[in-house]
Image (cartoon, grey):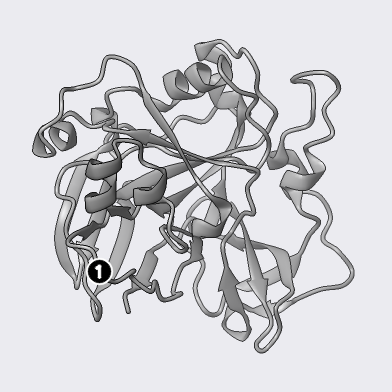
C-alpha cells in the first residue's frame, strides 16, 4: 500500500451546471472511477482571508478539514469532471525549456517570459476542445501546473514553495498564426478551451519540491510527442514564484503553467491529447479535439 494522498477537484451532477468541490483519497495512485468523493468547502476561497500579506492559512490545510454534511458522495463515476480549480488568474511561463526555445527558433530567455490566459480558457479533463477554424497551426504544449495555496507577495526564493498547495497538469494550447503575427500572446493563447487542466489537484505539504527526475509527457493519439525531466526547466518553480511575487500578488487558487518542453505538435479535429507526469502521479489530462 502506498502513501495516503489527498486530491481536490470539482464535479457536476449529470444534467446540472452547479459545480461542487470534492476531496478524494488514494494510496498514491490517481483517482479512478471507483474512488469515493466527499464534499468540502472550497479551500482556495477560504484561504483568501489574509491579513495584509502572507499570514493566511494555506489551502492545503483547509482542504484537509472536515467534509461538508451536504453535497456529492459516492464513486467518482457518478459525476462529471469540471476544472479542478476556479483560479483568480492563470499565469504562463514561456520558453522555460531550452530545447523548446530552440525548436521555435527563439533565443533562450535570461528572465522568465510571463503571459496570462483568461479564465474562460479553462477546460476540464475529458471535455472536448473545439478548435477554432481558419488557422494554419494550433499546437499542444504539455505542462506541469502549480496551484498557489497561500497569498504571496515579495516572497524569497527559499520560501516560495511554502505558498504552493498542490500540482496538476495543463495544456497551454497555442495558435501559432496569431502568436507570431501579434507578437503579444493574448489572442494566440486565449481562445475558449485553450487551457485544459486537471483532472485533479494533488495536494502536497507546503514546501514540497517535486522530484527533478519526474518527466512531463505529452501524447497525441497515443504517440509520445513530448518527454522531458522537469529539472530541465530554465527557471525552476521556486524561482518563478519568487519572480512573480515581486511583480504581482499571487492568490490562493492561481494556476502557474510552468512551461513546455520540445516536441510541440500541431492539432486537428478527431485527435486526442493526453498529458501525464511520470515519477510523481498526477493522473491523466485527456482532451479530445473537435
- When the figure is inspected, residue 56 is found, relative to residue 62, above or below; the finding is above
Residue 274: x and y in percent read 30, 65
- Residue where numbered disc 1 is placed: 134
User: Total of numbered circles in the picture?
Assistant: 1
For the C terminus, the quadrant is bottom left
* Relative depth, front residue between 95 and 44: 95
Residue drawn at (33%, 16%) of the image: 111
Residue found 37% across the figure and 69% down from its top: 286
Q: Residue at x 67, y 34 (%)?
A: 251
Tell which residue pokes out farthest to the bottom in this image.
Answer: 15
Bin the neighbour count of mark 1 within 10 Å (Cα to Cα): few under 14, some 14-19, many 20 and up.
Answer: few
Element on which disc 1 rests = loop
Left or right: residue 247 versus residue 71 is left
Residue 106, by quadrant, is top left
Could you say which is closer to the camera, residue 223 or residue 7?
A: 223
Q: Tell me which corner region of the image, top left, top right, bottom left or bottom right, holds residue 133.
A: bottom left
Q: Is residue 209 above or below residue 11?
A: above
Residue at 26 percent across and 36 percent down: it is: 213
**Picture layout, residue 91 above or below residue 196:** above
- Locate residue 220: give its quadrant: bottom left
Q: Position of residue 12 (x, y in %)?
A: 67, 76
Depth check: give the residue in front, 15 or 115: 115
Residue 263 x %, y %: 14, 49
Amino acid at each position: 500500500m502506498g502513501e495516503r494522498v489527498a486530491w481536490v477537484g470539482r464535479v457536476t451532477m449529470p444534467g446540472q451546471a452547479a459545480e461542487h468541490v470534492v476531496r478524494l483519497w488514494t494510496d498514491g495512485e490517481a483517482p479512478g472511477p471507483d474512488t469515493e468523493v466527499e464534499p468540502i468547502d472550497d479551500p482556495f476561497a477560504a484561504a483568501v482571508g489574509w491579513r495584509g500579506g502572507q499570514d493566511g492559512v494555506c489551502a492545503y490545510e483547509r482542504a484537509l478539514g472536515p467534509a461538508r454534511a451536504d453535497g456529492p458522495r459516492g464513486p467518482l463515476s457518478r459525476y462529471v469532471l469540471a476544472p479542478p480549480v476556479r483560479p483568480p488568474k492563470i499565469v504562463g511561463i514561456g520558453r522555460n525549456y531550452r530545447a523548446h526555445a530552440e525548436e521555435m527558433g527563439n533565443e533562450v530567455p535570461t528572465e522568465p517570459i510571463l503571459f496570462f490566459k483568461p479564465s474562460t480558457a479553462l477546460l476540464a479533463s475529458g471535455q472536448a476542445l473545439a478548435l477554432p477554424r481558419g488557422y494554419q497551426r494550433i499546437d499542444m504544449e504539455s505542462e506541469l501546473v502549480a496551484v498557489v495555496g497561500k497569498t504571496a507577495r515579495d516572497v524569497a526564493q527559499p520560501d516560495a514553495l511554502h505558498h504552493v498547495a498542490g500540482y496538476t497538469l495543463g495544456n497551454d494550447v497555442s495558435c501559432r498564426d496569431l502568436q507570431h503575427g501579434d507578437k503579444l500572446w493574448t489572442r494566440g493563447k486565449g481562445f475558449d478551451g485553450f487551457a485544459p487542466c486537471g483532472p485533479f489537484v494533488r495536494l502536497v505539504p507546503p514546501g514540497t519540491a517535486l522530484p527533478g527526475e519526474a518527466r512531463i509527457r505529452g501524447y497525441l493519439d497515443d504517440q509520445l510527442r513530448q518527454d522531458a525531466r522537469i529539472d530541465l526547466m530554465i527557471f525552476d518553480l521556486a524561482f518563478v514564484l519568487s519572480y512573480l511575487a515581486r511583480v504581482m500578488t499571487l492568490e490562493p487558487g492561481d494556476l502557474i503553467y510552468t512551461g513546455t518542453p520540445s516536441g510541440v505538435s500541431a492539432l486537428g479535429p478527431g485527435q486526442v491529447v493526453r498529458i501525464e507526469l511520470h515519477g510523481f502521479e498526477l493522473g491523466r489530462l485527456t482532451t479530445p479535439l473537435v
